[in-house]
Image (spheres, rainbow, N blue to C red):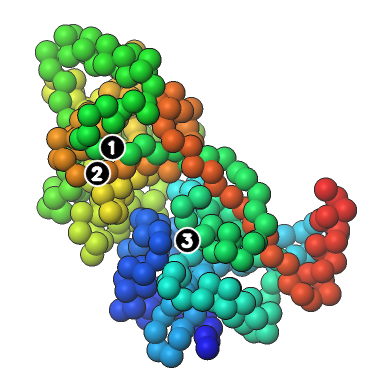
């Protein structure tokens, strides 16, 4: 019923472009990290070895995509070959794409059979990590009873204009943030919010975001992890800004007077604002500029009127203080039926 074939790297990904969006539209989870533009950017600029996609087709129709990278590991005195998701600090979540109207079990079995028989990419274990509760992969895992291990939470909050919608948030946090915002407004005459998604203005906004991020602990005098420290990082985020998906990126700013004090690099999909990078000016830390910007974004979305979501993607402590909803992320493992795969599974279970 299904056939599976590889598509490798940027060239392989481009061959899927015409069918990718149709498949995405048939997925239960259509989040930003499942978009073609996201995968194109990471293949071009963040993952030099490239991604291999196991593509499931029914006739000529693409019905599922499983992304993998190969990694070598040495354990128990042996070399392993692992198929896993991209392991990168700028890629916090993993997922697959599959048409939820298709037979989930048959799709999974077809991919596993293909991986067992193909000789192009050797492997002993598959590691699925950091897939969240609402992801396509988790829906598949529940349907086929694939064992999962809980990892850290990903945090988000729904936003809408209904009365008392904010009762899910911490009253203490809201009170504190509003007090700090009023104090800042009093000290600097005004407090304002800017959201930029205009393609013609995004580059300027991006330059301002990078400057702010590099001025703090992520800059050259700190951990040197800011976007501005790496040409590939800059190219990756610029690629997202130039995505074909409309309004895929918005860059938000909070101002005290005319001074930009906090910023968010948001990747948007289905009115979900994913805060993939944040920055603030540490000189104004006592006013809580990062939290004040969250508040202003909430107010902006309420004024817009449409139901929305703010997703911080990971699970930072500052977001927990807002009482954002905790969405569990998971990991799962599949071992090759080969002799070495079974041996590694046995040794790993004994180690536990």
Whole-percent x and y of residue 260?
21, 27
Check disc 2: other Cα within 10 Å, few if <14, some if 14-19, many if 20+: some
Picture quarter containing residue 122? bottom right
Residue sitting nearer the eye, 185 or 217: 185
Which secondary structure lies at badge 3? helix
Determine which residue is flagged by label 3. 136
Where 112 falls versus 197 (above or below)? below
For label 2, the residue is: 307
Q: Secondary structure at mark 1?
A: strand
Q: Are marks 2 and 1 in contact (CB under 8 Å)?
A: yes
Q: Position of residue 86 (x, y in %)?
A: 53, 59
Local crowd size for mark 3, using a 10 Å CA cut-off: few (<14), some (14–19), many (≥20): many
Q: Residue at x 85, y 61 (%)?
A: 346
Residue of label 1: 159
Circles 3 and 2 in contact, beta carbons < 8 Å? no
Residue at 55% of width from left, 67% of height from top?
Answer: 68
Q: Cα distance, mark 3 to mark 2?
A: 22 Å
User: Which of the 4 quarters of the picture holds residue 227?
Assistant: top left
Q: Where residue 176 appears, x then y in whole percent? A: 33, 13
In the depicted view, which residue is nearer to us: 113 or 138? 138
Q: Report the residue at 88% width, 53% height from top.
A: 350
| Relative depth, front residue between 60 and 241 | 60
């Amino acid at each position: 019923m299904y056939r599976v074939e590889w598509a490798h790297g940027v060239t392989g990904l481009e061959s899927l472009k015409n069918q990718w969006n149709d498949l995405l539209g048939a997925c239960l989870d259509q989040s930003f990290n499942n978009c073609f533009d996201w995968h194109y950017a990471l293949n071009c600029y963040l993952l030099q070895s490239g991604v291999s996609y196991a593509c499931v087709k029914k006739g000529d129709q693409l019905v599922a995509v499983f992304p993998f990278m190969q990694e070598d590991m040495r354990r128990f005195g042996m070399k392993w070959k692992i198929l896993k998701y991209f392991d990168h600090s700028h890629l916090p979540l993993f997922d697959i794409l599959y048409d939820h109207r298709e037979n989930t079990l048959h799709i999974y079995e077809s991919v596993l059979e293909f991986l067992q028989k193909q000789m192009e990419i050797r492997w002993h274990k598959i590691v699925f990590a950091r897939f969240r509760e609402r992801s396509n992969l988790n829906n598949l895992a529940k349907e086929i009873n694939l064992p999962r291990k809980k990892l850290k939470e990903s945090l988000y909050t729904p936003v809408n204009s209904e009365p008392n919608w904010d009762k899910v948030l911490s009253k203490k946090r809201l009170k504190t943030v509003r007090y700090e915002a009023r104090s800042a407004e009093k000290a600097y005459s005004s407090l304002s919010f800017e959201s930029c998604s205009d393609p013609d203005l995004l580059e300027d906004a991006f330059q301002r975001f990078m400057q702010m991020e590099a001025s703090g602990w992520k800059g050259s005098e700190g951990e040197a992890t800011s976007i501005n420290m790496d040409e590939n990082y800059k190219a990756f985020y610029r690629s997202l800004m130039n995505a074909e998906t409309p309004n895929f990126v918005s860059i938000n700013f909070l101002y005290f007077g005319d001074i930009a004090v906090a910023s968010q690099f948001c990747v948007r999909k289905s009115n979900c604002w994913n805060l993939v990078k944040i920055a603030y000016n540490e000189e104004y830390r006592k006013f809580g500029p990062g939290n004040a910007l969250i508040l202003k974004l909430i107010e902006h979305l309420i004024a817009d009127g449409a139901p929305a979501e703010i997703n911080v993607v990971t699970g930072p402590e500052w977001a927990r203080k807002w009482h954002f909803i905790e969405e569990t992320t998971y990991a799962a493992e599949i071992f090759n039926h080969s002799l070495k795969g079974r041996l590694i599974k046995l040794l790993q279970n004994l180690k536990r």
